Amino acid sequence: MENTYPDGELLICADCGHEWSQAAAASESTMVVRDCNGNVLANGDSVVVIKDLKVKGSSIPLKQGTPIKNIRLIEDDAEHIEGHSDKIKDLVLKTCFLRKAN
């Protein structure tokens, strides 16, 4: 939250009174996003869809092998990425259905 402040070795939330160590906060911020094979994904990577997926709000499905280029990681969410295919824009996809492109 935005009303946190350091107090010695601890961070304190002024809103709820919760206290935690700064080391725990630093380890939480190092989120790692992985594809279905365990490869680490980063912003700007390209991925490939590993199975046919129905897309909500579109009549066009994503077919197996569809490339998703220039992905963006979602902050605080290691299971989803944002990206675009050639035919469908503004997709949010689960990483378990993606593999990193070579």
Image: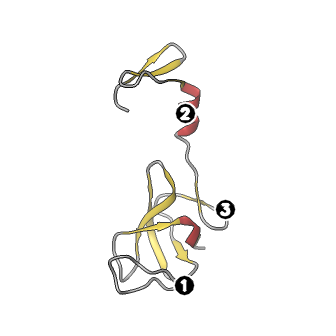
Q: How is the image coloured?
A: secondary structure
Q: Residue at x 50, y 65 (%)?
A: 45
Q: Residue at x 44, y 50 (%)?
A: 75
**Are circles 2 and 1 on residues that touch, CB within 8 Å?**
no
Q: Which residue is mark 1?
A: 64
Instruction: Judge left or right: residue 44 versus residue 24.
Output: left
Q: Which residue is mark 3?
A: 38
- The amino acid type found where label 2 is placed reads Ala
Q: Residue at x 37, y 21 (%)?
A: 14
Q: Position of residue 63 (x, y in %)?
A: 49, 86
Q: Of the residues under marks 3 and 2, which one precedes in the sequence?
A: 2
Q: Position of residue 74 (x, y in %)?
A: 44, 55
Q: Of the residues under marks 2 and 1, which one precedes in the sequence?
A: 2
Q: CA distance from mark 1 to mark 3?
A: 19 Å
Q: Which residue is mark 2?
A: 26
**Where is the N terminus found, in terms of image quarters?**
top left
- The amino acid type found where label 3 is placed reads Gly
Residue nearer the viewer, 101 or 12: 12
Instruction: Judge left or right: residue 6 versus residue 41.
Output: left
The answer to whether one can see residue 98 in this image is no
Q: Residue at x 52, y 83 (%)?
A: 52
